[in-house]
Amino acid sequence: MFHFSDLDFQMMSRAILLAKKGIYTTAPNPNVGCVIERDGIVVGEGFHHRAGEPHAEVHALRDAGERSIGATAYVTLEPCSHYGRTPPCAEGLIKAKVARVVCAMQDPNPKVAGRGIAMLREAGIEVEVGLLEADAQALNPAFIKRMQIGRPYVQLKMAASLDGQTALANGASQWITSPQSRQNVQAYRAKSCAILSTSKTVIDDNASLNVRWDDLPQDIQSTYDHSQLRQPVRVILDRQNHLTSNTEQLKLFNTPGKVLTVSDQGDIEPEINIDGQIDLNATFKALVESHHINHLWVEAGATLAKSLIEAELVDELILYLAPKLMGSDGRGLFGALGLESMNETHELTIQDVRQIGPDIRIVATLNKRNKKDK
Amino acid sequence: MFHFSDLDFQMMSRAILLAKKGIYTTAPNPNVGCVIERDGIVVGEGFHHRAGEPHAEVHALRDAGERSIGATAYVTLEPCSHYGRTPPCAEGLIKAKVARVVCAMQDPNPKVAGRGIAMLREAGIEVEVGLLEADAQALNPAFIKRMQIGRPYVQLKMAASLDGQTALANGASQWITSPQSRQNVQAYRAKSCAILSTSKTVIDDNASLNVRWDDLPQDIQSTYDHSQLRQPVRVILDRQNHLTSNTEQLKLFNTPGKVLTVSDQGDIEPEINIDGQIDLNATFKALVESHHINHLWVEAGATLAKSLIEAELVDELILYLAPKLMGSDGRGLFGALGLESMNETHELTIQDVRQIGPDIRIVATLNKRNKKDK
């Protein structure tokens, strides 16, 4: 076990805060922060801004200049060892003559994990790993999941009344939640790689499913410039090819940002399962492998929500509850699940509960189900 | 506007904390605390323990003894002016020769409000009113409502899955919420004057609806002695006289505490409304007028919940949500409300949200409905 000093904790905490500055811009790349410290003083710092631009270590080393000689570099993720769009960061740290590197975590890709560390050690640099590791992992759950198991991290957003209704019996639903909650949704969209929905939602609600700068919270607007606004890819499930004609009037196709349709006449050829539905598992695999999508934000109705829950593809449920009672004759969140015993219920773990304006936002992770529960 | 000093605020805060010590025992009497201060030092303090026992001022004056001469008395509620089971507290303060009395609020009964204050002023005592008034009101919402409009304060407790289901389609529901939530319910029961339910709940669940000392949270067990455990009155709606025969085996009648049945063969004669249902408004009026019940804790199913919501008789909804998804084919919280437009929904205001063990507890007050909404 390593015995990190107070200074080590301070510096890595600072690196983690720096990494967070990229949460709206780096996707599908990870959020990474770097601090260069010498004699107890920060001599350089940086974070990864967006894919294609320099890594955090490059910014920090540029900032430090010659002061990096004999310094300690704190990085929230193992420095890369491969030649990509940029030369490997491990090489940069060696050239800058740092004496010591502290990484919060190894590269999550099991095929490359440890290579950057090995490269540094071979050059005679002292390397320590694991400082504030859980915090560093929390920066990039989606990047880590893609690297480790080749699947996207899925956040399912839903909105309902306190009694779990998404619409009245006649379909009326605007608006259940408050402007503050809808603004909160914009911040989630802005962080995601891609927004998943269905052609039904796109057509029924004429939903644009994009990020609107003016709707972003003030704190985000002050974090980065309007010109840096990144539009997540919009992925629309369209098994019946509803989006191949009469689409000129749809906001989806008239707002900035890429659209990928999942249909046999669209961008991604779907696999159809024995129920005649799009195989979501196969689609998600394709999104990761062909489109580097690691973080999927889902906004759709009860039908897709139910399919995702039943296929155990949801990592997080983000549920906005409005302080209203609508009655059980309305439309429920997930439709019929056909459960016959209380030990068949889909169990979650609450991660966060807070008030958003007049509403409540619940963030909960889906528990892994035991085989016997299925 | 009064200009209270820092010392005034400190002393009244202390009086409010003292008042809270009685929340499990004073019903149907209000919670009241009193601090006697002289030369910046607390020379006496007390709170009301239970109906029939001395008021807060009596305890505090006994504690102060001769040190009350020339002191300031801080009381969370206007001292009483009438001869009841105890002599009026205003008289006690006059006899004790206090120089000044600060009350957080007037007596909420409009017929007597101000009389205690007048009695003190006539005796030459300086009196100020309104310090920390909102906090003092929050001590006794039910007592205040009974005094002001002759109706009980109604808390409706419900429990559901995150998607608003109280049972599966086949009726299975044990247990939706956690032991921690059920323990939390015990604390609410212990604070109430009376617990309202239906003969259906009593028979289907064989519910005892009493307070079990062993299930009370540790902090309550250490606040007062087991021997002081007060059982709320259990009020059971029983329009069809189900509780008149074969009741020997029901826990309701085999556990400590009084039971009042609302049925034409029971303790309270119900008024029957045009729908053939018990008129809840009339029953609540009877509970106040004949049984001094001011704080009603309701545990029942969707049918009673719906009736209470529709009759606008609910002050607070206490909703326990378990981290489970059960599907919309289960049983909903309030049954069909028959709403046809989003501006007909029953609106609430969230007062508190917190995690109770693995569950979430939401406390929300029901907003007054506009006539046009009905």
Image (cartoon, coloured by chain):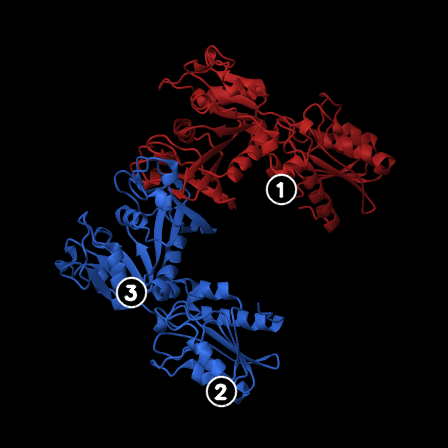
Chain colours: A red, B blue
Is residue B217 visible in the rendered image? The answer is yes
Where does the image place residue B111, in percent across and percent down from the top left? 37, 71
Q: Image check: A242 left or right of B314?
A: right
Q: Chain of mark 1?
A: A
Q: Image check: B191 left or right of B97?
A: left
With respect to residue B341, does A282 lie above or below? Answer: above
Residue at disc 2, secondary structure: loop
- Depth check: give the residue in front, B330 or B59: B59
With respect to residue B150, does A79 lie above or below? Answer: above
Which amino acid lies under the numbered mark 1 shown in the image of this protein? Answer: Asp
Q: CA distance from mark 3 to mark 2?
A: 35 Å
Q: CA distance from mark 2 to mark 1?
A: 62 Å
With respect to residue B320, does B215 lie above or below? Answer: below
Pair 1/3: label in front: 3
Q: What is the quadrant of the C terminus of chain A in the image?
A: top left
- Depth check: give the residue in front, A367 or B1: B1
Q: CA distance from mark 1 to mark 3?
A: 56 Å
Residue ID at (44%, 69%): B222
Residue pointed to by mark 3: B288
Instruction: Tell me if label 2 and label 1 are in contact, CB under 8 Å.
Output: no
Q: Chain of mark 2?
A: B
Quadrant in the rendering for residue A173: top left
Mark 2, Cα crowd under 10 Å, few <14 / some 14-19 / many 20+, is some
Marks 2 & 1 on one chain: no
With respect to residue A166, does A233 lie above or below? Answer: above
Residue pointed to by mark 2: B96
Residue pointed to by mark 1: A135
Q: Sequence order check: which comes first, mark 3 or mark 2?
A: 2
Where does the image place residue A106, in percent across and percent down from the top left? 65, 34
Is residue A76 visible in the rendered image? The answer is no
Residue ID at (45%, 62%): B138
